[in-house]
Image: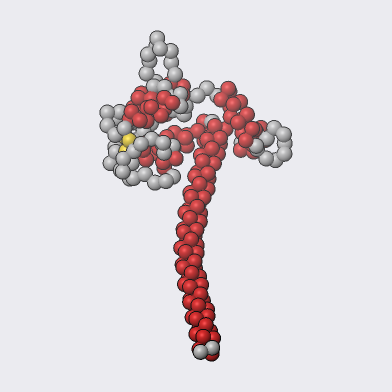
Amino acid sequence: EQIKLFNKMDTNKDGLISLAELESGLHMSSSVHSPSAATQPQTLKHSQSQKSRPPSLSQSKGKKLRTFTTESHKLNDRETLLFSSVPHNEDGSASPEDILDLWDQLGIVHGSDLLMSLGFNTDRQINMSDLTAVLNEVLADLSSSDPVCFAALIGYQHELRHLRSALNEAVEENKKLQQDLSQANAYNSLLAIDMDDSHFQVDEYWKSKLLDTLRNIKGAYR
């Protein structure tokens, strides 16, 4: 099945899948498969006249997602990938309003209903690690229901992590270069001071020699 999927996405038959081919395959898959409430939060869009709430994720999948509280492990660099732009506290929790604002900017409607479907209380702080973990569980379900979407999302997620790692390395390298430059400037300052002292001593030496010579000349003509 994976080989068939690869051959289907490899339209130019060069043995490689380009980003354009991956996006084309994702578009073709989204037009063939009808998205479910658990795998595609965007399907929660309804007309304003209906005012209907989206089906629960636990109902659509035939199982109940575990309910999380804000008392859980703290965020690490990898888990903040989805919500690094959301202001959060030291314990990794954020207000539901900030999360809903982000989703609204991304075009995800009925965000409050979506959070409740995921098992979160919109009346208190939400731990970002827990929210990321739940969404990753939903993402894992795509591997069987829609492998093309799953491959695309995993690819984008990997690329974002790679770019973040490269950015961190560049920042660390920049810090080291700044430290080396600071040390070089300090060394140059000490070298300049040492050169000034050396020039002063040389000037004093030749000044003393000149005065001695003048005194000898004056003594010879007395």
Residue 200 drawn at (x, y percent)? 48, 73
Image quadrant in which you'd find residue 18: top right
Q: Who's the residue at 47% across and 35% down the image?
A: 139
Decide if residue 78 is on the left or right side of residue 10.
Answer: left
Residue toward you, 190 or 140: 190
Instruction: State the scheme by which the image is colored.
Output: secondary structure
- Compared with 212, 166 (above or below) is above
Decide if residue 131 is on the left or right side of residue 144.
Answer: left
Q: How many marks?
A: 0
Extreme residue toward the front, this view = 222
- Compared with 36, 128 (above or below) is below
Image quadrant in which you'd find residue 69: top left
The answer to whether residue 127 of the structure is visible from this angle is no
Decide if residue 192 is on the left or right side of residue 16.
Answer: left
Q: Who's the residue at 35% across and 30% down the image?
A: 98
Residue toward you, 187 or 88: 187
Residue 56 drawn at (x, y percent)? 37, 24
Extreme residue toward the right, this view = 13
Q: Who's the residue at 51% across and 31% down the image?
A: 145
Residue toward you, 206 or 107: 206
- Compared with 34, 2 (above or below) is below
Indicate the quadrant containing the N terminus: top left, top right, bottom left or bottom right. Answer: top right
- Compared with 180, 43 (above or below) is above
Q: Who's the residue at 31% across and 43% down the image?
A: 90
The answer to whether residue 146 of the structure is visible from this angle is yes
Decide if residue 65 is on the left or right side of residue 185.
Answer: left
Image quadrant in which you'd find residue 100: top left
Residue 135 drawn at (x, y percent)? 42, 34
